[in-house]
Image (tube, rainbow, N blue to C red):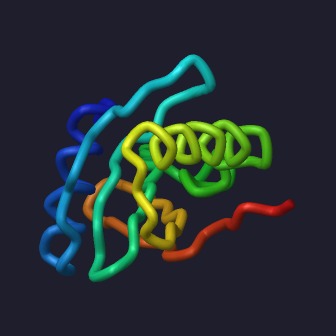
Amino acid sequence: MHGGESEEEACRFLKERGYRILARNWRTRMGEVDIIAREGGILVFVEVKARSGDGFGGPEAAVDSAKQRRIISTALSFMEVTQCALPMRFDVVAVRPGKVCLYQDAFQVVD
């Protein structure tokens, strides 16, 4: 399964759970956020990771501290550009063959 298919599956999964998808593949020079969604009054930045197996610790293990910093920087840029004042959260969607897992509030902005 390639990135586009995984993101499509993640979007379907999130919509079924009440998320409203606002943007996909939002990029800056700092990085990219796969999905930007709204869940109630919260703006959610979602990283989608897919793996065919757990040989390298599963898809969620690929969202290391360096990747988190890039996502946070990109999210802060989105907040500034759009002048959005909603609280934000960072979720990870792990896609495996036949299984999708959502990790809400997977990491936080640390000052």
Report the residue at 52% width, 69% height from top: 89
**Quadrant in which the N terminus is drawn:** top left
| Residue 81 coordinates in the image, percent (x, y) | 43, 37
- The image quarter containing residue 70 is top right
Residue lying at 54% horizontally and 63% vertically, measured from the top left: 90
In this view, the residue farthest toward the top is 29
Q: Is residue 55 visible?
A: yes
Left or right of 25, for residue 90: right
Q: Residue at x 39, y 75 (%)?
A: 42
From the image, which quarter does the C terminus lie in?
A: bottom right
Left or right for 75, reference 86: right
Kindly tell me whether residue 56 is visible in this rendering: no
Quadrant of the rendered image containing residue 98: bottom left
Q: Name the residue: 50% across, 67% down.
A: 88
Residue that extends furthest to the right in the rendered view of this protein: 111
Q: Residue furthest front?
A: 83
Q: Is residue 70 above or below residue 35?
A: above
Indicate the position of residue 21 as horizontal and vertical percent values.
20, 56
Of 93 and 51, nearer the camera is 93
**In the depicted view, which residue is nearer to us: 104 or 43?**
43
Residue 46, how many percent across, how many down? 43, 55
3 sits left or right of 111 in the view? left
92 relative to 34, above or below: below
Q: Is residue 21 left or right of residue 61?
A: left
Nearer to me, 96 or 111: 111
Q: How many marks?
A: 0
